[in-house]
Amino acid sequence: MGEVYRARDTRLGRDVALKILPAEFSADPVRKQRFEQEAKTISSLNHPNICVLYDVGTQHGVDYLVMECVEGETLSQRLEKGPLPVDQVLKYGAQLADALDKAHRGGIVHRDLKPGNIMLTATGAKLLDFGLAKSAVPLVSATLTAAAPQPAPPTQVGTVVGTFQYMSPEQIDGEEIDGRSDIFSLGAVLYEMLSGIPAFHGQTIPQVINEILRHNPPPSPVPALDPLLRRCLAKQAAQRFQTMKEVRAALERVAQAAAGTTERSVAVLPFANRSADPEDECFSDGLADEIINALMRVPGLKVIARTSAFAFKGKQDDIRRIAEALGVENVLEGSVRRAGNRVRITVQLITAADGTHLWSERYDRELADIFAIQDDIAQAIATALRVTLAARPSDIQRHIPKLPAYEALLKGRYHMLRQVGRDERFKMYFEQAMALDPDYAEPHANLGLAHFLSAMIGSQSMQKTMPLVRAEAQQALSLDPSDAGPHFLLGSVAASYEYDWKTAAEHFTTAMAHRSSVSPETHWAYASFYLQPLGRFQEAVSEMERAVELDPLNVFWRGVLASHLTHAQLYDRAIEQAKEALEMDAASYVPHFTLGEAYATSGQWTKAIEALENAHRVMPHDGLVSGMFAGALARTGQKSRAEGLIQQMGEAPRPIFGRVFYHVLCGDTNAAADWYERAIDERDPFALVFASVPLTTDFRQSSRWPKLARMMNMPEQLAT
């Protein structure tokens, strides 16, 4: 593509790299276009691990670039001396992943990542030569905004560009590519850095191509990195990491494990109620819940969610077993005794491995001091675990609620978490808290969440409920702008009710800004209502994996994760995850359903029918279960039984989308489209959740799909 010289910029007194395109190449419009593209590409990127472009121009008919002169050696030169130490591979790999993440977020795919285009300097790795870079639609962008259409690239589909030894399978086949192709190339580079030999090699180019398309490299010399490398080098793009941000995070986790600096973790068990009045249980539960919320503000601390931590309520399990089940190093337990206006709280932080007490304390104070006690406990835990409790912004004063309002909030939360969809006493208590303290944001945030959960389980209609969710979330933010929590509710409303992708992206960006304090509900909503409809399945899987990590005993999260794995075409993992959830609770219909979905999507219809029949037995009136079950029966020739199920569903099933699934599986496109349109009109959330999944691929090729996609304001590339 050009020749590079070391040169001296006499005006600024610095050495530079001067890249020129020979005169005969300048006469070639295609080559010149690529040369100009490289200049524009590099100039749009500003990253410490990407070479800097200083100037571009033409003199005497010769095109040139003036670039940063990078001192060091290429990775190719370094590899001539043998493999690199593991710590250097992890360091350089994370830097390259971060640089490529920057490029991908700008819609730029490198397409020629190889050791010769990587410089190793005194400060780290430097990515060079974007000569074959391509502006492309960021199908799996690491940003939270919906992908906008990009100008058509000059290279036509079917044209192979790059260096064969490091090309992805789709690049070799001349297919349209995105950032996942660079992920494959980075995997090949990392493998060579570790082993000293290329991941794919042969005597001829056809032999190399055959290796890339059909074979996997031998295990690397570093077993801890093999899972990461295998995922980068997966033949199918959907099986790889979906963003460079994920690759960087995975490399950093390996580095942390190697350095013994793994993420700190704690589970807060429900506090025992030692009061004479059993009604004080909601107070003791609420206190533990408040401490969980406070600890979630600690960067670098994994805090197990309430659902899983409270699974051990009233049980005398061994601390080691509890910690192992929850995947934590430390456990906080305590008790609460309330008498009149006095409260006695005893707490101890225990290291699970050996049962030693890291810290313990007893608080015997006035009930009015409860908020100071909560802060003291959170700070003491952070100190004991050697992490830092995040401070609130100095310009935002914390509202100290009135004690009666706080007690009403705890009662409302107690009933919401136990009886949502079946008992609406939570609404009475939340409204009581609002009346007692109009400046208190938490009752509004909790009532918004309760309405949202009621809509998701189908006990209330979306049309009735989502405006209430929005109003309560907005009121909560007006009273406490520093709380990112309500933004996930507003993002969910914008996506699933208003089909407003731009607003949804803005709210989810804010909600996800501080990853350590993101709740499992936020990970779920972001994955299900934003990432998944846009076809960003692997990112959705990552979010649900984090939800399960934070709430490991929550069977619903595991069932949803199984569904997301199916949509990412990771069928074996989906089936495994659904079965693990069923081992935890065979009476839950969600993992039965998602197991059936995994079998159906992968074409295992007999097993799909068995799993869906189990789901139907547990939840016979759920329209989604009945619809997919009937469709699977019809697909295998059991028409009369399928029609009987449809008759039982009637003309107003809940959710409506079950009828869509039935007609899709029967191949009745028009009926499926009619029901789909009705589902959209009534804002059935599953119309969005299943908009881009593999099971509806054939349906989306029909002439009816573009209208439906436009009704949901789907991005252009998903509407055609």
Image: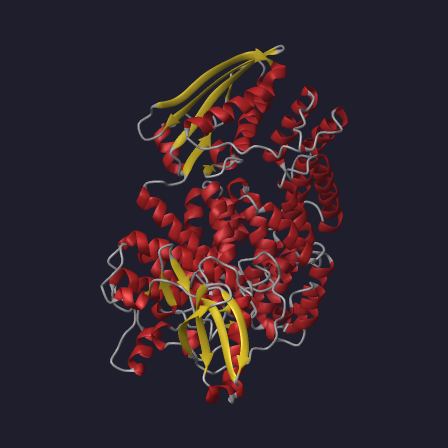
Left or right position of 468 against 389: right
Residue 639 % position (x, y): 56, 68
Relative height, residue 251 to residue 32 (above, below): above
> In the rendered picture of this protein, how many numbered marks are placed on residues?
0
The way the protein has been coloured in the rendering is secondary structure
Left or right position of 658 against 32: right
Residue 196 % position (x, y): 25, 64
**Residue 586 visible here:** no
* Image quadrant where one finds the N terminus: bottom left
Relative height, residue 211 to residue 684 (above, below): below
Residue 132 % position (x, y): 46, 75
- Residue at screen point 31% across, 46% down: 258
- Foreground residue, 563 or 251? 251
- Foreground residue, 136 or 79? 79
Report which quarter residue 417 is drawn in.
top right
- Residue at screen point 50% across, 77% down: 64
* Image quadrant where one finds the C terminus: bottom right
- Foreground residue, 691 or 424? 691
**Residue 166 visible here:** yes
- Residue at screen point 72% across, 45% down: 470
Residue 644 % position (x, y): 61, 61
- Foreground residue, 108 or 696? 108
- Residue at screen point 51% across, 57% down: 539
